[in-house]
């Protein structure tokens, strides 16, 4: 049971990290674009 919860939380963390990195990259690109 605890292993399943741990695996689930890790999976959620990875998905959150991916979406957070995508947003981070999006804003970095937007700042470069508007900085010109």
Image (spheres, rainbow, N blue to C red):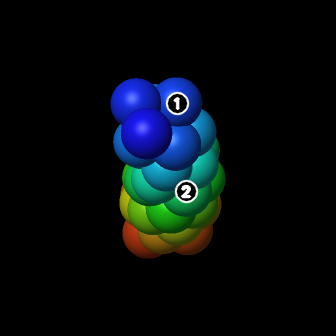
13 above or below 28?
above
31 above or below 8?
below
Q: Residue at x 40, y 30 (%)?
A: 2
Q: Nearer the viewer, mark 1 or mark 2?
A: 1
Q: Residue at x 52, y 30 (%)?
A: 3
Classify mark 1: residues with Cα within 10 Å, few (<14), some (14-19) or many (20+).
few
- Whole-percent x and y of residue 28? 50, 51
Question: Considering the image in quadrants, where does the N terminus appear?
Answer: top left
- From the viewer's side, name the closer residue of 2 and 24: 2
According to the picture, the residue beneath numbered tag 1 turns out to be 3
6 above or below 8?
above
Q: Residue at x 52, y 43 (%)?
A: 4
According to the picture, the residue beneath numbered tag 2 turns out to be 15
Is 9 situated left or right of 4 in this image?
left
- Whole-percent x and y of residue 17? 50, 44
Dot 2: element? helix
Dot 1: element? helix
Q: Earlier in the sequence, mark 1 or mark 2?
A: 1
Residue 36 shows in this picture: no
- From the viewer's side, name the closer residue of 3 and 26: 3
- Whole-percent x and y of residue 15? 55, 56
- From the viewer's side, name the closer residue of 20 and 12: 12
Is 34 situated left or right of 10 in this image?
left
């Amino acid at each position: 049971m605890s292993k399943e919860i741990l695996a689930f939380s890790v999976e959620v963390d990875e998905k959150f990290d991916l979406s957070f990195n995508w947003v981070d990259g999006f804003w970095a690109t937007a700042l470069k674009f508007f900085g010109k």
